Amino acid sequence: MLVLLLAAVASVAALSAAWAVVRSTGDGGWVDAIWALAAGLIAAAAALWPAQGADLSRQALAAVLIALWGVRLGLYIGRRTAAAQRPDPRYERLKVEWGGWNAKAWRFLMIQAATVVVLVLAVRAAAVRPEAGLDLRDALAGAIVLVAIAGEALADRQMAAFRRDPRNRGKVADHGLWGWSRHPNYFFEWLVWLAWPVMAFDPAVPASWLTLPAALMMWWLLNHVSGVPMLEAEMLRSRPEAYRAYQARVSRFFPLPPKR
């Protein structure tokens, strides 16, 4: 409980700092960068927090894996936001609804702070699994996270390359991973959270059930709240015909061979 309390305090502090940064810069994209960094680093600290019966090597593995994910994603979004010529359109629409980056916006960011605590809980539960020594489940969980980080990084690089080419203005990225999924970056981001049940889940161990809510929450958020719906609404607004054709032939979330 102390670990969760400290994680909650740190999450509130981080997202409050994000709110202050956005009020200063006017670009809501910084929220996502700070959220990713906060989630990764707070979860890494929680994984390393001492626990009776926990194996230090497993705690260290969990901490390194989640820190790699959070730092890579946070720095990528931060660089993208700093280089952007206009504020993130998703947050611009929200800002209009809120009437500016006011107290209503801060309360929204506190919901994001709460999601960090749910993610921290999953990593902590996996890290303190009371079995000595790393085993095949730990190796498999590590492989899932590394594949997810590599896949998300590749999707991000492919999208960045597409946007840099002036010939693609007004078009929809449909090559590489983006030809198999309309949101491969979100798919791989969700995949990270499947690693912790693999590392720790045991129906007979009540604490291991705490690794499941993070994967379920991320699935719901990415598919039904702040991920896919907001981005697809923006794409349909900016390039309706091209994006509808893209929707017709490419899988929404899971990477699958495109339709003819």
Image (cartoon, rainbow, N blue to C red):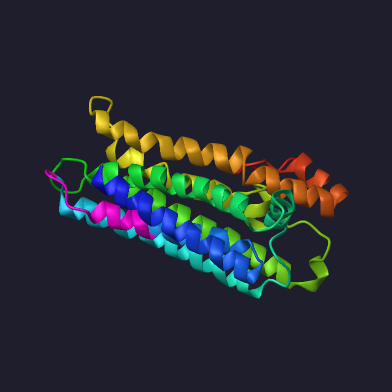
Say whether residue 90 is magenta: no
**Residue 243 drawn at (x, y percent):** 80, 48
Q: Residue shown at 66%/53% (left/top)?
A: 178
Give the residue at the far right of this rendering.
Answer: 241
Please give left or right for residue 111 compared with residue 23 in the image. left
Numbered range of the magenta stretch: 41-53
Please give left or right for residue 176 compared with residue 236 in the image. left
**Residue 187 drawn at (x, y percent):** 55, 46
Say whether residue 52 is magenta: yes
- Against 170, is 226 above or below? above
Q: Residue shown at 70%/55% (left/top)?
A: 95
**Residue 183 drawn at (x, y percent):** 63, 49
Characterize the magenta stretch by its predominant secondary structure. helix
Q: Nearer the viewer, residue 34 or 239?
A: 34
**Residue 226 drawn at (x, y percent):** 62, 46
- Against 23, is 201 above or below? above
Which image quarter is the C terminus in? Answer: top right
Q: Nearer the viewer, residue 241 or 70?
A: 70
Which image quarter is the N terminus in? Answer: top left
Is any atom of residue 153 visible in this view?
Answer: yes
Is any atom of residue 260 visible in this view?
Answer: no
Residue 220 falls in which quadrant of the image?
top right
Q: Residue shown at 69%/47% (left/top)?
A: 230
Q: Nearer the viewer, residue 92 or 195?
A: 92
Give the residue at the far top of this rendering.
Answer: 204
Number of on-image labels: 0
Please give left or right for residue 101 compared with residue 136 in the image. right
Give the residue at the far front of this rendering.
Answer: 103
Please give left or right for residue 39 compared with residue 97 in the image. left
